[in-house]
Image (cartoon, rainbow, N blue to C red):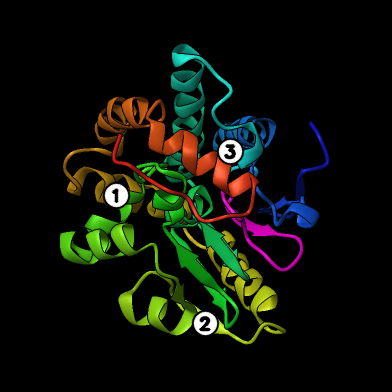
């Protein structure tokens, strides 16, 4: 394991931290694999009663590491998408409560990671955005699934098409986050929430999560299969190539719908 994902356990609470602050915790392929492995291990560890997912630095997660995009063949792209999906499923389906401590930007796949958690405790600096359109991609990481279930189709479409930023106060009013605290108090508030859950009836919490998953149709697993097909086509489009290139060149993309 690299030091870009750190894990600390105290009693029944495990704290998992994204630790790439110099890059705003942008996810590398290695970080995705590590998060997947960590959450799978925690799910089977009976000493773990709750999980706190947080980040170091001023950003929760600035999305995927765009510098590696557009370098795979079709099979490589499909594998990349499937690895991201496995990570999201591991976070969402773990049979332990998961609290997300969200400070600063959570964009792209970073927003999907936050939404995969059970509870989001945000700071006043938190901001969420579906920035996929800026690099010529469709929504990723189950974002369409999470948001359409929480917000409905129209609001989800607005966020995806506009790629606008949702700040903490709006996120609270929309129900995307559970609590908002000052930047100084957020970490402790999130930890207190997670500690309370770790002392609670974990078996009952797991049953709640299973019932809520069953109440949503289609399942996240079934939805992600559709996302693989859609994103697998989009990722090879000229627009995505232009989007990734323009991002690295720090200029506005010129899309042609191809």
Which residue corresponds to the image point at 70% horizontal and 57% vertical from the top-left? 24
Earlier residue among tags 3 and 2? 3
Left or right position of 171 against 226: right
Query: Where is residue 56 drawn, in percent x and y?
Result: 75, 60
Q: Nearer the viewer, mark 3 or mark 1?
A: 1
The reply to whether residue 48 is visible in this rendering is no
Q: Earlier in the sequence, mark 2 or mark 1?
A: 1
Question: How much space separates mark 2 and mark 1, taking CA atoms?
Answer: 24 Å
Which residue does the image show at 48% across and 56% down from the upper left?
111
Regarding residue 113, the answer to whether it shows in the image is yes
* Residue marked by disc 1: 144
Magenta stretch: give its range: 48-63
Q: CA distance from mark 3 to mark 2?
A: 25 Å
Q: Which residue is mark 2?
A: 180
Horizontal side of residue 99 vs 175, given as left or right: right
Residue at horizontal 55 percent and vertical 19 percent from the top: 72
**SS label for mark 3:** helix
The circle drawn on residue 39 is 3
Q: Nearer the viewer, residue 19 or 137?
A: 137
The location of residue 199, given as percent across then percent down, is 58, 63
In which quadrant of the rendered image does the C terminus lie? top left
Dot 2: element? strand
Disc 1, SS: helix
Residue 93 in the image: above or below residue 158: above
- Find residue 255 and report its image quarter: top left
Magenta-colored stretch includes residue 223? no
Occupied quadrant, residue 15: bottom right
């Amino acid at each position: 394991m690299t030091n870009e994902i750190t894990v600390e356990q105290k009693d029944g609470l495990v704290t998992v931290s994204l630790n790439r602050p110099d890059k705003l915790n942008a996810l590398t392929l290695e970080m995705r694999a590590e998060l997947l492995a960590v959450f799978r291990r925690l799910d089977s560890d009976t000493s773990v009663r709750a999980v706190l997912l947080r980040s170091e630095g001023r950003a929760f997660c600035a999305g995927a590491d765009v510098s590696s995009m557009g370098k795979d063949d079709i099979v490589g792209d499909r594998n990349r998408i499937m690895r991201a999906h496995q990570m999201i499923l591991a976070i969402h389906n773990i049979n332990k409560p998961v609290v997300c401590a969200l400070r600063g930007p959570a964009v792209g796949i970073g927003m999907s990671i936050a939404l995969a958690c059970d509870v989001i405790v945000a700071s006043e600096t938190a901001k969420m955005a579906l920035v996929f359109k800026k690099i010529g991609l469709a929504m990723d990481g189950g974002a369409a699934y999470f948001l359409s279930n929480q917000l409905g189709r129209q609001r989800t479409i607005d966020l995806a098409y506009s790629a606008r930023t949702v700040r903490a106060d709006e996120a609270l009013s929309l129900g995307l986050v559970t609590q908002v605290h000052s930047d100084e108090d957020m970490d402790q508030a999130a930890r207190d929430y997670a500690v309370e859950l770790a002392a609670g009836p974990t078996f009952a919490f797991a049953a709640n999560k299973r019932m809520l998953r069953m109440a949503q149709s289609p399942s996240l697993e079934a939805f992600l299969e559709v996302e693989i097909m859609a994103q697998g086509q989009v990722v090879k489009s000229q627009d995505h190539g232009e989007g990734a290139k323009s991002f690295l060149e720090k200029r506005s993309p010129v899309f042609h719908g191809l």
